[in-house]
Amino acid sequence: GQQLNQSPQSMFIQEGEDVSMNCTSSSIFNTWLWYKQDPGEGPVLLIALYKAGELTSNGRLTAQFGITRKDSFLNISASIPSDVGIYFCADEGGGADGLTFGKGTHLIIQP
Amino acid sequence: KAGVTQTPRYLIKTRGQQVTLSCSPISGHRSVSWYQQTPGQGLQFLFEYFSETQRNKGNFPGRFSGRQFSNSRSEMNVSTLELGDSALYLCASSLVASGTTDTQYFGPGTRLTVL
């Protein structure tokens, strides 16, 4: 089946720094979804991408759907303490097999 | 509008027992999907229900089952619990079935610990 590789696995950054993480797949995707999960909560959708080359922003977050349709990145500018959490990329699969998730990037912000 | 609710939030069981978890979707949503989250395997799709019918199932043994009621509420059941079933079980609801661009909204999950 599809595999999503997320990197880095974890990030330790200072408050105010910019963050960049990415996701690659072994096959072509029709969608890229970015979720964030806070401790003790379920994932929350941040950004959805549906077209190759698409660049979408949501406040301080920016995500892009790679031209090859096999990768996506998520950037967070000027990080703040509430950005701490696990960020997941996911794909809808285009069928009826639910979402396929990457293993996540743990973002830790040091004061 | 209330979000997806899951009960109970925490559960402790012993090996061999069975467990039933409940999920109430967002009002008006007809699709409910279940996922298992573990540190080792990450988030994995269990199954999806739409209009009281199971649409599809992930790669899990038959001990994992579910159902959906006419009000769209869903339950999942795990029989003969094993230690490896310890996980966060997440439910997600959406207006229509998966495979569309409709957003899935996740509940807070039920943390199951099997001793």
Image (tube, coloured by chain):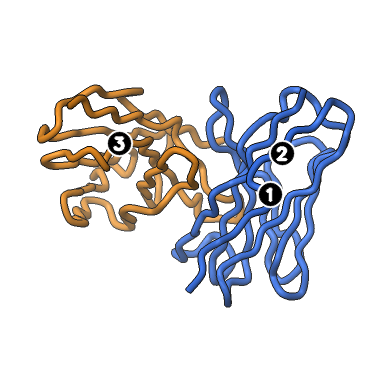
Chain colours: A orange, B blue
Q: How many other residues sit within 10 Å of disc 3, few (<14), some (14-19) or many (≥20)?
A: some
Relative depth, front residue between A17 and A88: A17
In this view, B16 is above or below A82: above
Q: CA distance from mark 1 to mark 3?
A: 26 Å
Instruction: Name the subunit of mark 2.
Output: B
**Tags 1 and 3 on a common chain:** no
- Disc 1 vs disc 3: Cβ atoms closer than 8 Å? no
Residue B79, horizontal then vertical, whole percent: 86, 38
Tag 3 residue: A84
- For image coordinates 36% across by 38% down, the residue present is A87
From the viewer's perspective, is A34 left or right of B87? Answer: left
- For image coordinates 20% across by 48% down, the residue present is A61
- For image coordinates 48% across by 32% down, the residue present is A3
Tag 1 residue: B8
- Disc 1 vs disc 2: Cβ atoms closer than 8 Å? yes
Which circle, 3 or 2, is nearer the viewer?
2
From the viewer's perspective, is B74 left or right of B17? Answer: left
**Tags 3 and 2 on a common chain:** no
Q: Secondary structure at mark 2?
A: strand
Residue A103, horizontal then vertical, whole percent: 45, 30
Amino acid type at circle 3 is: Val
Q: CA distance from mark 3 to mark 2?
A: 26 Å
Q: Quadrant of the C terminus of chain B?
A: top right
- For image coordinates 38% across by 47% down, the residue present is A35
Amino acid type at circle 1 is: Pro
In this view, B73 is above or below A39: below
Tag 2 residue: B11
Residue B67, horizontal then vertical, whole percent: 79, 59
Q: Secondary structure at mark 3?
A: loop
